Image (cartoon, rainbow, N blue to C red):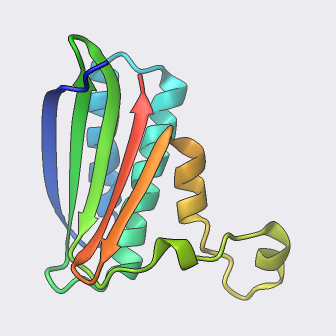
């Protein structure tokens, strides 16, 4: 099955509080346009919000922008939504991020740190590409 890009939209968002709302609105509109079910749309929207918040909080990007690209994939009909959330920040090593556990988080002062686990649970495919030049979270959801 070929994965042709049927449609692509890219947002350049300033890293300011609530910029993830604009990304989630676009995710919703595109997912609705390919007739994704409401439950799957909610999952996509939550994953986009988490990825944008991670970029805002952790990238330390000097350009203070996050780029969100939405691609509708399929041949000939829409089959999948691919979303890439990219920053030009400091990067990190995804394989050394501790997997959060409920027991540890209940004891911890800082209760946050669930973003990547949530994204992986919500989306069908997740790939994280990160280097000193920034991070790109690539997430896919089948229609």
Q: Quick check: 114 left or right of 15?
A: right
Q: Quick check: 120 left or right of 73?
A: right
Residue occupying the point 72% across, 88% down? 109
Residue occupying the point 67% across, 70% down? 99
Instruction: Report whether residue 17 is seen.
Output: no
For this rendering, which residue is in front, 55 or 141?
141
Q: Residue furthest front?
A: 1
Residue occupying the point 20% across, 76% down? 88
Quarter of the image where the C terminus is located: top left
Return the x and y of residue 83 as percentages of the image width and height. 31, 45
Q: Residue 64 occupies which quadrant of the picture? A: bottom left
Return the x and y of residue 98 as percentages of the image width and height. 64, 76
Asked if 54 appears above or below 70 in the picture, the reply is below
Asked if 38 appears above or below 25 in the picture, the reply is above
Quarter of the image where the N terminus is located: top left
Q: Residue 8 occupies which quadrant of the picture? A: top left
For this rendering, which residue is in front, 94 or 102?
94
Q: Quick check: 106 left or right of 98?
A: right
Instruction: Report whether residue 125 is seen.
Output: yes
Return the x and y of residue 57 as percentages of the image width and height. 40, 78
């Amino acid at each position: 099955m070929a994965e042709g890009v049927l449609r692509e939209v890219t947002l350049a968002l300033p890293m300011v509080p609530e910029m993830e709302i604009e990304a989630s609105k676009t995710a919703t509109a595109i997912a609705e346009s390919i007739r994704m079910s409401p439950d799957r749309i909610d999952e996509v929207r939550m994953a986009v919000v988490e990825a944008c918040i991670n970029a805002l909080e952790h990238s330390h990007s000097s350009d203070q922008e996050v780029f969100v690209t939405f691609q509708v994939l399929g041949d000939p009909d829409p089959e999948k939504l691919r979303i890439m959330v990219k920053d030009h920040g400091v990067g990190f090593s995804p394989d050394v991020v501790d997997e959060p556990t409920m027991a540890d988080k209940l004891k911890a002062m800082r209760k946050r740190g669930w973003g990547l686990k949530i994204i992986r649970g919500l989306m069908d495919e997740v790939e994280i590409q990160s280097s000193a030049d920034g991070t790109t979270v690539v997430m896919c959801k089948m229609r």
